[in-house]
Image (cartoon, grey):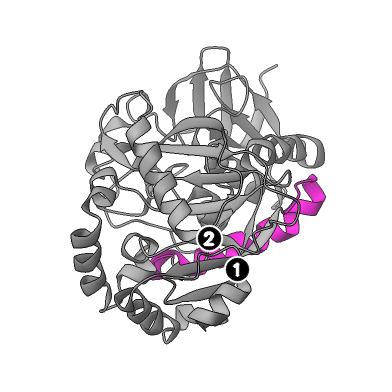
């Protein structure tokens, strides 16, 4: 007898799992289908940094919802919250001006603008000589993605009876029918969350939204001394020209001009510094950004050195031994930060195209599932539906 579901989700990355969670909590019977045998993509190759402050005005409220769900979900699913808070440490008057403008907006609610002395006091491992000030946000939290994503899937299976079909490639989606290499699924609703696979399902939708792939480099430094503990996830000046909530401020144009003159190689490699600490004391540091239809698969020592140069310029890091290096790939678009497209009344194609799925997927999924169940406005996108 063919099993039937209220919702079939194609893709078991964070976006797919978020939709499975939102639907399950509404009492729907859910199946998740993925081609891999375990979590292997961008959802486990990131910082695990659930970021609210600095998100664009479009996604800021959604990030707040996502952060709240992570807070509720983590203890239920056995996912440790490794640390909290965000601190953007800046090193120029131009960067400080951006922070001053940002905290005056509604998105700066709850954040503190720190003078240089207070910034170093709050983050004692910051190199004090060049610090101009900092922004402290209490809204962020961090999980370890390589364990959090499998734990989330296990929680969905055990607590909500979600069916997982792994090692099954989806060949076609037609209204209520999902054809895979293993079997055919029948569901009242379908969410397609394909991540970096832009050609197997609905390639015309990805083309319409200008989606390409982004390759990033990240690394892990060996555990630091027990007394060396970051009080927050750390970012620096370059966050203010990359994160749209910051870069939308009027003063950001002058900061970009200053940074392009002072350190043009950072823009060449697309580097944006983030440093987070794991439970064992090791540091996850990154990352760079390289865009294309098919980014090359190679790790660059030159880019690694540039990332580490930035990190060591911001923080006094005692143990500089590199333990791990890796590459991540995620879908990216200059046209939109996400999209939700309805090829028919019962199917939704969902993509997050800014690399912030950990920070926004739960909120986005709540919107999409509510709309599919007929009780909310379509989450939509900046492009028309097909």
Q: Residues within 10 Å of mark 1 (few under 14, many from 20)?
A: many
Residue at the (55%, 42%) spot, across then down? 320
Quarter occupied by the N terminus: top right
Task: State which mark lies toward you, 2 or 1.
Answer: 1
Q: Residue at x 25, y 79 (%)?
A: 250
Do the residues bearing badges 2 and 1 touch, measured as CB atoms within 8 Å?
yes
Please give the label number shown on residue 123. 1
Q: Residue furthest top?
A: 182
Residue 68's place in the image compared with 174, above or below, is below
Instruction: Please say if 215 is above or below 34.
Output: below
> Can you say which quadrant of the picture contains the C terminus?
top left
Rendered location of residue 190, percent (x, y): 51, 37
The residue range painted magenta reads 55-81
Residue at mark 2: 234
Tell me the SS state at disc 1: loop
- Asked whether 56 falls inside the magenta stretch, the response is yes
Q: Choose between 83 and 78: the one closer to the eye.
A: 83
Majority secondary structure of magenta residues = helix
C-alpha separation, residue under disc 2 versus residue under disc 1: 9 Å
Q: Quadrant of residue 239?
A: bottom left
Horizontal and vertical percent for residue 378?
43, 59
Q: Is residue 212 magenta?
A: no
Residues packed near mark 2 inside 10 Å, few (<14), some (14 to 19) or many (20 plus): many
| Residue 190 in view in this figure | no
Where residue 321 sits in the image (x, y, percent)?
57, 36
């Amino acid at each position: 007898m063919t099993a039937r579901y209220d919702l079939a989700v194609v893709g078991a990355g964070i976006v797919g799992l978020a939709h499975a969670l939102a639907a399950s909590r509404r009492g729907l019977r859910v199946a998740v289908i993925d081609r891999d045998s375990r979590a292997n993509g961008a959802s486990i190759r990131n910082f695990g940094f659930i970021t609210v402050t600095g998100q664009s005005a479009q996604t800021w409220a959604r990030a707040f919802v996502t952060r709240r769900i992570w807070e509720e979900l983590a203890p239920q699913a056995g996912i440790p919250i490794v640390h909290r808070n965000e601190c953007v440490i800046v090193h120029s008057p131009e960067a400080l001006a951006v922070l001053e403008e940002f905290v005056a907006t509604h998105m700066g609610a709850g954040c503190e603008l720190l003078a240089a002395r207070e910034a170093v006091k709050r983050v004692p491992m910051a190199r004090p000589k060049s610090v101009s000030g900092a922004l402290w946000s209490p809204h962020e939290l961090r999980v370890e993605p390589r364990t959090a994503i499998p734990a989330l899937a296990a929680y969905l299976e055990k607590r909500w009876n979600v069916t997982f079909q792994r090692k099954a490639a989806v060949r076609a989606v037609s209204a209520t029918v999902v054809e895979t290499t293993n079997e055919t699924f029948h569901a009242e609703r379908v969410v397609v969350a394909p991540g970096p696979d832009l050609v197997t399902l609905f390639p015309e939708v990805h083309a319409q939204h200008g989606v390409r792939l982004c390759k990033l480099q990240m690394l892990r430094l060996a555990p630091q001394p027990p007394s060396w503990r970051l009080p927050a996830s750390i970012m620096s000046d370059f966050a203010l020209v990359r994160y749209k909530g910051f870069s939308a401020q009027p003063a950001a144009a002058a900061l970009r001009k200053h940074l392009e003159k002072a350190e043009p190689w950072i823009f060449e490699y697309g580097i944006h510094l983030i440093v987070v600490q794991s439970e064992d004391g090791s540091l996850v540091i990154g990352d760079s950004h390289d865009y294309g239809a098919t980014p090359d698969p190679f790790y660059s020592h030159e880019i690694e050195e540039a990332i580490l140069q930035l990190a060591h310029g911001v923080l006094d890091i005692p143990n500089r031994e590199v333990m791990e290096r890796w590459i991540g790939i995620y879908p990216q678009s200059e046209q939109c930060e996400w999209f939700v497209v309805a090829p028919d009344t019962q199917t939704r194609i969902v993509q997050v195209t800014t690399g912030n799925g950990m920070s926004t997927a739960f909120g986005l999924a709540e919107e999409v599932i509510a709309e599919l169940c007929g009780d909310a406005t379509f989450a939509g996108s900046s492009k028309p539906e097909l």
